[in-house]
Amino acid sequence: NVDLAEIASDGVHLANNEVAMSLLPQRREFEATAEAWNGTCSAKGIAQWNAEGARMDVDYVAENLSVHHVFKEFDDFGQTTLRSEHLSGLLDSDGSAVLEWNADGTWAWDRIRWAGNQTLIDGKLIGVESLMSIPDYLSEHRMAAPLINPVDLRSKLVEIALQPVATPAYFFENTIHIPQCALSSEELNVSIEGSQSLAGAIDYSIGIELRELRGMKSDDIGMIEDDGLGNHLFINILGTVDEPEFRWDRESQRAHRRKDFQAERDRLKALWDKTPQK
């Protein structure tokens, strides 16, 4: 067992560390706790190595971390869509990771995997370019006028104070994957799902719930339709971080419409199935 007041490596600072380790030939089994990023962390795992490189399998639990400091110290986890300056709030996370290094000590990115569950409390999104670029693009291409006020939408996207957010996320094949994640505030509901590679390729679907959506219009990229049920606008952001391409996400629009129609049918069925109380 080892107690260390502070550990610093590659910009990461851990305090009040307790480590229990079993030493075996070319293998280490460990359990550790530490204070970091204004919260607490615990982990257990196995590290092993040979002439071809090294590998660490680790399970972890982290509580009450400053999401801003976590993203800052880990260089935004190799992506640019959500950066430390975009984020505030307290993060809980638990998951598993496989970390691998080549024989020369460099990261073996193509073999690194991670899966975790995240919960953000008192979170804020501040100046996220991928969101704020949506009304600018719609306005520039004359796509927004019949649907929304782009100035009003942009003002709502500058800073979003979030209700508690819970979502899984994954990293494999050099790409971060985010399943559908609901971001809710008092003024705006946003859903995000998609992926971004370390090379900067992006494929996101973003849904924005707006009361201002109305009617339909044919524009330069096809027919824009109000779903008539939830007033959602769905947009794909494809291409690269440096050269994003915007498209209407009709597949998500249709799926959302089917879901709401089914919910309405279920409500009607439940209503008709009710029998009077005697």
Image: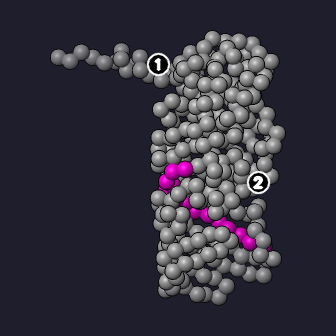
Quarter in which the C terminus is drawn: top left
Residue at 65 percent across and 88 percent down: it is 25
- Secondary structure type for disc 2: loop
Residue stretch rendered in magenta on the structure = 88-102
User: Residue 86 or 26: which is nearer the viewer?
Assistant: 86
Q: Quadrant of the rendered structure where residue 266 is?
A: top left
Whole-number angstrom distance, CA of label 1 to CA of label 2:
44 Å
Residue at 65 percent across and 28 percent down: it is 234
Find residue 144 and report its horizontal and vertical position in percent: 70, 20
Q: Amino acid at mark 2?
A: Leu
User: Residue 244 or 46: which is nearer the viewer?
Assistant: 244
Q: Earlier in the sequence, mark 1 or mark 2?
A: 2
Residue at 54 percent across and 63 percent down: it is 37
**Numbered disc in front, either 1 or 2:** 2
Please check the rendered image and state whether residue 92 is part of the magenta-colored stretch, yes or no.
yes
What label sits on residue 111 in the rendered view? none
Q: Amino acid at mark 1?
A: Arg
Q: Which residue is disc 2 drawn over?
A: 198
Q: Which residue is disc 1 drawn over?
A: 265
- Above or below residue 185? Residue 121 is below
Find residue 27 and report its horizontal and vertical position in percent: 63, 82
Residue at 73 percent across and 20 percent down: it is 143
- Above or below residue 196? Residue 261 is above
User: Residue 66 or 77: which is nearer the viewer?
Assistant: 66
Find residue 267 and report its horizontal and vertical position in percent: 41, 20
Find residue 107 and report its horizontal and vertical position in percent: 75, 68
